[in-house]
Amino acid sequence: MSDSERLHDKIARLGEDFGATPGGWRVLRADNPEALTGLLLREVEETVLTRCLVVEGGSGGPARIIVAAGRILALETAESAISGADGFEDPGDFAVALASALRAYVGGQTALRLRSERTDFAPGPGDPRCPAAQVAGLLRPGAAGGKGLRAFADMLSDHALAWRLSGNGTAGAGGDDGSGPQDRVEALAAYLRDHRPDIDAQLDVALGGAGRPGCILLATAGADDIRLVCARADGAYLAMLLSPSAQADIAARWSAVFSA
Amino acid sequence: MSVMDNLDALRRALPGCSVVALGDLSAELVLCASHSGQVPQERLDSLCAAASALLGAPQAGRAARLMGAGAGRGPDMAVVMTGLDTRVFLRSPVDEADVLCCVCGRNVDITDAAELARSTLTEISAQP
């Protein structure tokens, strides 16, 4: 059976259609305003086509964020109107202005309403387009990098069979760090060293953006019941073999160190 | 109970869950999904692309060997922690191309989520 025939059969079996087009209002909720801003920026990052994200619930009325390909082209709130056409000499200044305006708009809120609509906004050919991740980086309370990954590894140490940390700021005296039986630490080190481009590519797809900090856990049935964790933050990388007992609350531990 | 009923029930059962999607790994295609509010198609597509990168790519096989899996075996579960949410991807034990993608709250209990998702996959696979 060909792939298309197999899919046709599967879709026919499922017998369901579903609409997934822009249009309706959605509610973003988070524990705190910083996380809420992170959710909003995640929406920006995941918006591929040129769209206006209309946001309600923040300071002074609705905000309009013009977005394309995960980048902000313009932002308009009751208090400020910022566009790449404003003549920023340094694209970084555009990001700072956007971060400042977004922080002011979200204020102390923990929920916002959001909908996406079409727009005919056309940026100038040389106008800066600010990646959502750049704004998120400015708003994140201190990049954790290798120290954050080390803190995360320490949290899981009771369940860790071995771990290896490499890259930016991973050891106080310089160099890499690790713990566990030598053969396993060496295997993890080789994994991080020999397959870094593949690991980055996998993390980029899984996390929805190049260079984003994040963590993946992988499990294979029957594979000695060992979990593999691979994490990245600000140029540092962690690979860790864990027992399944660490699995239940690993997400809470990650967000305790790296919540946006 | 229809497939959509299964997906809706799973979404309601998982804390903070906004999307549950059933996809096909080899085609990187979401076949049906339950979600709160409207979700753009490109976001569903990116979920399936992530599932494929984590569970289906050669890189996944290398990762599985580190865990002691035999040659040719890839992971059957992947969890992605972003700090904003936690995404659970589970491959069907019946049809290796079927994958369930769940976008959950960031502090979700992975063990509980995986058990619920596995049960849902089993129910879906058992349907005629």
Image: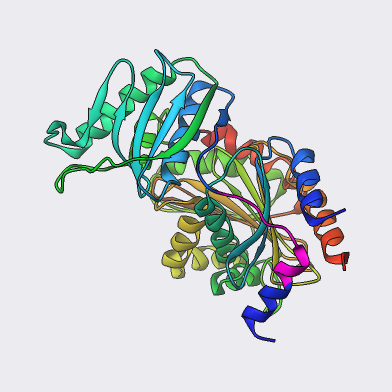
Q: Is residue A159 above or below residue B97?
A: above
Q: Position of residue A145 (x, y in %)?
A: 43, 42
Q: Residue A72 lies in what quarter of the image?
A: top left
Q: Residue at x 63, y 68 (%)?
A: B25
Q: Position of residue B23 (x, y in %)?
A: 66, 62
Q: Is residue B60 above or below residue B6?
A: below
Magenta includes A128? no
* Residue B56 vs residue A52, the one in the foreground: A52
The mark total stands at 0
**Observer able to see residue A171:** no
Q: Residue at x 35, y 41 (%)?
A: A67
> Looking at the figure, which quarter contains the N terminus of chain A?
bottom right
Q: Is residue B78 above or below residue B69?
A: above
Q: Position of residue A257 (x, y in %)?
A: 54, 34
The scheme the figure's colours follow is: rainbow
Q: Residue at x 55, y 36 (%)?
A: A24
Image position of B73 (left or right of A68): right
Q: Which residues are magenta?
A: A10-20
* Residue B120 vs residue B84, the one in the foreground: B120
Q: Position of residue B118 (x, y in %)?
A: 81, 56
**Observer able to see residue A235:** yes
Image position of A34 (left or right of A81): right
* Residue A188 vs residue B81, the one in the foreground: B81
Magenta includes A18? yes
